[in-house]
Image (cartoon, grey):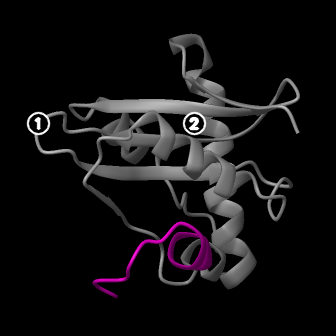
Amino acid sequence: MNFSLVKIKKSDLAEFKKDMQKAFQKGFEDKFGKTENTILPEKDIDKSLDAKGSIAYKAIVDGETVGGAVVVIDENSQHNHLDLLYVKYGMQSKGIGKTIWYEIEKLHPKTKIWETFTPYFDRRNIHLYVNVCGFHIVEFF
């Protein structure tokens, strides 16, 4: 697998958002069934992208975009946040999420604390963050 994690260019943002929304939508619908609601509205993605210290990455395997992430880096405190991480629908269970996370850690080695949130119903995400990436659950709601 020829993997790279690169910063998003403005010209790639529309596709990045669409792929992320599809992945989140499908994850919800796999658990609860079809819905007319948008599970991850574009305004929520934009809020993460517009945050101070925000960096958006896309994950590429063998020339194809397979996922991405948005992190918010606080250069002073190094208390950083993983706002969004997705693996493109149809590409799950291939180690891509884990590879994205490990690459993010390499890119931000000064981080003292990483925080993230994930939907309570998404067992795959919880498994990845807790059992693979080393996050600790500190609150559940």
Residue 40 shown left or right of residue 82 in the figure:
right
What SS does tag 2 mark?
A: helix
Residue corresponding to mark 1: 76
For this rendering, which residue is in front, 132 or 21? 132
- What x and y, as percent, mark residue 29? 70, 73
Q: Tell me which residue sits at (85%, 23%) in the image.
A: 63
Q: Earlier in the sequence, mark 1 or mark 2?
A: 2
Report the quarter where the N terminus lies: top right
Residue corresponding to mark 2: 17
Q: Residues within 10 Å of mark 2 (few under 14, many from 20)?
A: some
For this rendering, which residue is in front, 115 or 42? 115
Magenta stretch: helix, strand or loop mostly: loop
- What x and y, as percent, mark residue 64? 84, 29
Q: Residues within 10 Å of mark 1 (few under 14, many from 20)?
A: few
Name the residue at the left extreme.
Answer: 76
Establish if 123 lies above or below 39: below
Q: CA distance from mark 1 to mark 2?
A: 29 Å
Figure quadrant of residue 70: top left
- What x and y, as percent, mark residue 127? 61, 79
Residue 97 shown left or right of residue 3 in the figure:
left
For this rendering, which residue is in front, 52 or 16? 52
Establish if 108 lies above or below 102: above
Q: What amino acid is at disc 1?
A: Asn
